[in-house]
Image: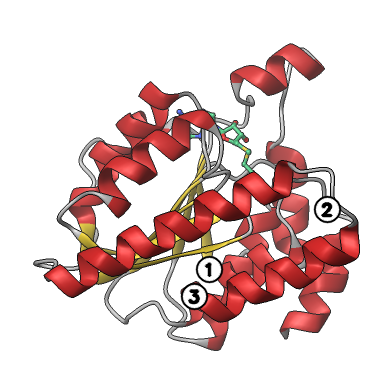
């Protein structure tokens, strides 16, 4: 399925991922190197999994491990009460014809990480959003990400993910080439970060700070659209 077809298919799927964010996942999955796998932490009803699966099929057809206990995060439980998303997840993944490449692990990220021994080419973190939980996901899974592999966090302007992203992607020593697409912040793992690469990370942090500040201002939508295009050009 190409990007346009996927946009149409995923429009009706429940979730928070935008079409531009979906396209980012599609391309990251497409570029995932042979001999590695994709790990998704937090699948909900499969909207992001469907983008990942189709992207992977356009590339090296690497397997996607979709980890989620399917009982929702704390905010979902508060809002909806008892949550069970696995049936809809399976339906969506099947509908998008990626069930042959997706392995669902119906457990928490911590439980799924026990005895894990596969190299990860793309690590997508969109599970629980409390700082301690995002930090745990990062600490458990990052060591399995290969050099040259990509890490991405969703809702990276939210307090919990933002703190982890700032500490390890922008100010850490393991990632270069940071960038952001709407709510996603991503970076490439590297054996060492040069001074130039550090400066780039700080520059992107500066851009993302302006982006999120302007996003909160009560300015007309057309002005925001132009602003977004400028930010895209500056990245
Ligand atoms: C924001 S939703 C994911 C949305 C999904 N990525 C999408 O784009 O459609 C967060 C998900 O994380 C799951 N979750 C919560 N705690 C988790 C944990 N410790 N390990 C794995 N998944 C978790 C929840 O069950 C929920 O489905």
Q: Secondary structure at mark 1?
A: loop
Is the residue under label 3 in contact with that under label 2 (CB below 8 Å)? no
Q: Is mark 3 within 8 Å of ligand 1?
A: no
Give the CA separation, mark 2 to mark 3. Answer: 30 Å
Residue 179, quarter of picture: bottom left
Residue carrying label 3: 235
Identify whether 201 is placed above or below 73: below
Q: Tag 2: Cα neighbours inside 10 Å, few (<14), some, or many (≥20)?
A: some
Picture coordinates of residue 135 (x, y %)? 33, 32
Q: Secondary structure at mark 3?
A: loop
Disc number lying in front (2 or 1): 2
Residue carrying label 1: 101
Label located before the other in sequence (2 or 3)? 2
Label located before the other in sequence (2 or 1)? 2
Residue depicted at x 83% and y 53%: 13
Identify whether 155 is placed above or below 100: above
Residue depicted at x 24% and y 38%: 139
Picture coordinates of residue 205 (x, y %)? 41, 55
Residue depicted at x 71% and y 35%: 85
């Amino acid at each position: 399925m190409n990007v346009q077809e996927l946009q149409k298919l995923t429009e009706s799927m429940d979730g928070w991922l935008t079409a531009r964010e979906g396209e980012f996942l599609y391309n990251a999955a497409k570029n995932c190197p042979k001999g590695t796998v994709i790990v998704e932490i937090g699948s909900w009803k499969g909207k992001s999994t469907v983008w990942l699966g189709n992207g992977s099929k356009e590339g090296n057809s690497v397997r996607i491990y979709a980890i989620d206990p399917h009982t929702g995060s704390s905010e979902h439980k508060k809002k909806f009460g008892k949550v069970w998303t696995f049936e809809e997840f399976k339906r969506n993944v099947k509908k998008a014809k990626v069930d042959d490449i997706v392995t669902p692990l119906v457990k928490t990220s911590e439980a799924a990480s026990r005895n894990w021994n596969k190299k990860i080419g793309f690590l997508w973190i969109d599970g629980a959003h409390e700082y301690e939980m995002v930090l745990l996901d990062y600490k458990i899974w990052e060591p399995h990400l290969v050099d040259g592999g990509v890490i991405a966090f969703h809702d990276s302007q939210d307090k919990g993910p933002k703190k982890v992203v700032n500490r390890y992607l922008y100010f850490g020593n393991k990632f270069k080439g940071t960038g952001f697409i709407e709510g996603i912040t991503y970076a490439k793992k590297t054996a060492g970060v040069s001074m130039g690469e550090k400066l780039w990370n700080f520059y992107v942090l500066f851009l993302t700070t302006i982006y999120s500040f302007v996003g909160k201002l009560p300015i007309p939508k057309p002005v925001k659209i132009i602003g977004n295009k400028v930010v895209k050009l500056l990245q």
